[in-house]
Amino acid sequence: MNNILIVSLLVLGVLGGVLAVILYFVAQKFKVEENPLIEEVESHLAGANCGGCGFAGCHNFAEACVKAAAEKHSLSGLYCPSSNMQEVADVLKLSVEASEPKIAVLRCNGSCENSPAKVHYEGADICAFANTLYAGKGGCSKGCLGLGDCVKKCPFDALHLDPVTGLPAVDPDKCVACGACVKACPRGLFEIRPRGKNDRRVYVCCSNTDKGAITMKSCKVGCIACQKCFKTCPFEAIEMRGNLAYIDPTKCKSCRKCVEVCPRGTIWEVNFPPRKPKVEAAESAKPINVTPESIEIKATV
């Protein structure tokens, strides 16, 4: 019995050794040499694997950069929103075009106050799940569900649910416009927009495409397609997408005339200085009544 056990162990040992040798030579035969530049480029990336570049992860993006550098000698079309692309370009000894800083914006202002709850939701705290069940607490079928799918998916901790409004708030100091929130929101309420000069921007804070009468029933600040902003804009930066106004950031000059005429307060102006009160403006614009008694006449001889 002992002899059989010893022989079995010897056979298994020899067989294991032979297979190990075979696997070694097979691995050497089919191994793929990876360009060391890929690892170096990847070391300069954020490592968040957020997908904002359009690739599956940072390693895939690094591979694409090295390949583009070898074939096209350019990084055109490749951009990582969460990394310094100049560092990547320096590794590959290429130049990179400066990209306009961007930020994610939530195009919904259906807060607890503006869109009061009409129903009570009991179910999984997942927006994607709730979106298939009902319109929303306030009744807006295009409004924020407030369950925080976007907050959970943000790899940079740039989103938090505001306990007062019930809406996700974007931290401008942390947001890198990776687009994770855009992909996470089942209602498409997030948009990546240019930060704007001096971090100032104007946009329509609504995504509801319902008719005005329906929108007014569910939200106090939803767009009702009155077209006042559309008719007022001197730069043709506003277009009507069905029953919803949209401001094109490439045409908008931040004159803010649309903000003044919007009867619902749907258009937001971010980081602009306070407007001068209209009363003061009207007083300063009044003509001065000049009477003979108010003028000191000096006669000269």
Image (tube, helix red, strand yellow):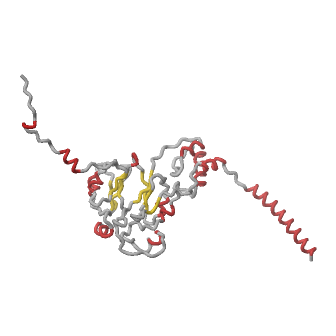
Asked whether 269 or 276 is in front, the reply is 276
Q: Position of residue 241 (x, y in %)?
A: 34, 60
At x 30%, y 54%, the residue is 259
Q: Along the horizontal axis of the image, is 225 left or right of 152?
A: left
At x 91%, y 71%, the residue is 7
Asked whether 298 or 191 is in front, the reply is 298
* Location of residue 118 (image quadrant): bottom left
Q: Position of residue 157 (x, y in %)?
A: 50, 58
Is residue 100 depicted above or below 214 in this figure? above
Q: Along the horizontal axis of the image, is 27 left or right of 87?
A: right
Is residue 291 depicted above or below 127 in this figure? above
Q: Along the horizontal axis of the image, is 110 left or right of 86?
A: left
Q: Position of residue 4 (x, y in %)?
A: 91, 74
Q: Along the horizontal axis of the image, is 137 left or right of 259?
A: right
Q: Quadrant of the N terminus?
A: bottom right
Is residue 202 depicted above or below 133 in this figure? above
Q: Quadrant of the C terminus?
A: top left
At x 7%, y 24%, the residue is 300
Asked whether 145 or 12 is in front, the reply is 145
